[in-house]
Image: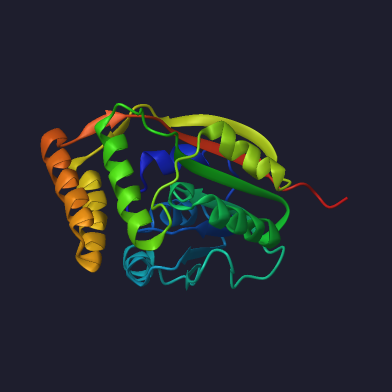
Amino acid sequence: MDVPETVRAALADVSVEGTTCLEAGAGVGNTTAGLLDAGARRVYAVTKDRDHARTVRERVGRDDGRLHVLQADLRSLPVDAETVDVTTAHGLCNVLPPAALDAVVTELSRVATPGCRLVVDDYDPPPADSGVSTLFGLENAAANATTGTPALSFYPSGALRRWFEGAGWEFQRERTLLDPVPWTHSHLSAHTAVIEELAAEDGSAHLRSIRDRARSLVEGIEQESVGRMYSLAFTCPDAG
């Protein structure tokens, strides 16, 4: 499969060939494909979503035994300590509230070898006056009303950098992957679908109102290019 340019740009300065890699939050396999194409010896593609796990196997699976898809919680990885040479998290942190992010960072630190490279790609908070910001706010309102937890947490690059530095990772570099970010109609519709699912499960007038506002918003803007996607790279210090 084709590797997205954002993934190639994020991995351009990372030595992947011959390493054991962990893709934290495999999604549909884009970064997993990038790691395999770059010559990884083994890739653990981790997701707790069954459909995503199946999609990664179907899209990226090869006959060489290098891909290991793990359906697991990132807060409790089925991976031995100090075994991962390169870790990637592409578009992961924005779906983790602070408590979950803290637990995930702890696990990523546990499995990292001394000298492990960590690449974290994510999004600055979109401008407050943008349509996508309003849509994401509606999604969080729906999630808070039904689960008590927001669906999305956009961390500025500086905040995410300090978070990983606080866990002992050494900062290496920051680069911009997209500016502005092209939020397509397909992207926006996917977020609306989350709201619709929550509204169907809850059934309240409040959730139906949020759903209707989201539908109207997406119909009105179709697509929007705003905000920035960034890439941060870190290194796990050598022991001692």
Q: Which image quarter holds the N terminus?
A: bottom left
Residue at image position (22%, 40%) is 184
Residue 23 relative to residue 178: left or right: right
Q: State the image coordinates of residue 36 (x, y, percent, origin top left).
A: 47, 57
Which residue is the extreme one toward the right? 240
Q: Which of the pair 148/158 is nearer the observer?
A: 148
Work out which residue is located at the far front of the displayed protein and give it: 205
Residue lying at 44% horizontally and 46% vertically, measured from the top left = 94
Q: Is residue 109 left or right of residue 138?
A: right
Asked if residue 19 shows in the view, the reply is no
23 shown above or below 189:
below
Residue 181, position as x, y percentages in the image? 33, 32
Give the x, y percent position of residue 67. 48, 67
Position of 29 with respect to 221 (left or right) is: right
> What residue is shown at x 43% (from left), y 52% (from top)?
95
The number of callouts visible is 0
Taking the image as shown, residue 70 lies to the left or right of residue 165, namely left
Q: Is residue 21 above or below residue 135?
A: below
